[in-house]
Image (cartoon, grey):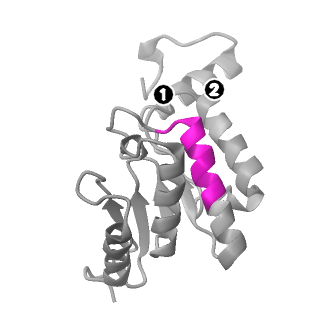
Amino acid sequence: MAILENISQATLIISFDDVPLSPALYEEIHLCRAACGEAHLKTILATGELGSLDNVYKASMIAMMAGSDFIKTSTGKEVENATFPVGIVMMRAIRDYYWKTGYKVGFKPAGGIRTAKEAITWLMLVKEELGVEWLTPELFRLGASSLLGDIEQQIFYHVTGSYACQHELAMA
């Protein structure tokens, strides 16, 4: 049973200033996993703080081994957010974990994803690195609060043949 009644998902934000890449990180995530009960645990790794792609891989593996159901690149508010190299490393960690355990962990890049073109690139990366079965809301999500306006602009262009003015779009 989860600490909070009727929750379906809990989010844990890891600050590597407070919890270094060590057994303490595993312990913190594992305790949150236990407290969540049946709720899904999404762990935000704040990858911009990790200093190297090797540390991104290690943090991803620790989070999954400790029981995270979803790993996310960042809150979207950090200086460095979702980058393709970091995303590929995290997806390869997810793939390695799946091959070893048979358990599928979700992935969410967040921050800096502002255009439909960038979103499509992330979709292609997930398909290539993890496979089509990961292209579901249960296993892949985009953290992109400013993306909707660009998608609206692109749809308008493909329907009318010209780009809209700001006042012609609901989300702009």
Q: Is residue 79 magenta?
A: no
Q: Residues within 10 Å of mark 2 (few under 14, many from 20)?
A: few
The image quarter containing residue 152 is top right
Tell whether 54 sits left or right of 120. left
Outermost bottom residue: 1
Q: Which residue is mark 2?
A: 155
Q: Residue at x 35, y 67 (%)?
A: 25
Q: Is residue 92 magenta?
A: yes
Q: CA distance from mark 2 to mark 1?
A: 10 Å
Rendering coords of residue 121 (x, y %): 67, 35
Q: Residue at x 56, y 22 (%)?
A: 153
Report the predominant secondary structure element of the magenta stretch.
Answer: helix
Q: Residue at x 51, y 74 (%)?
A: 65
Whether label 2 touches label 1, CB < 8 Å: no
Q: How many marks on residues?
A: 2
Q: Helix, strand or loop at disc 2?
A: helix
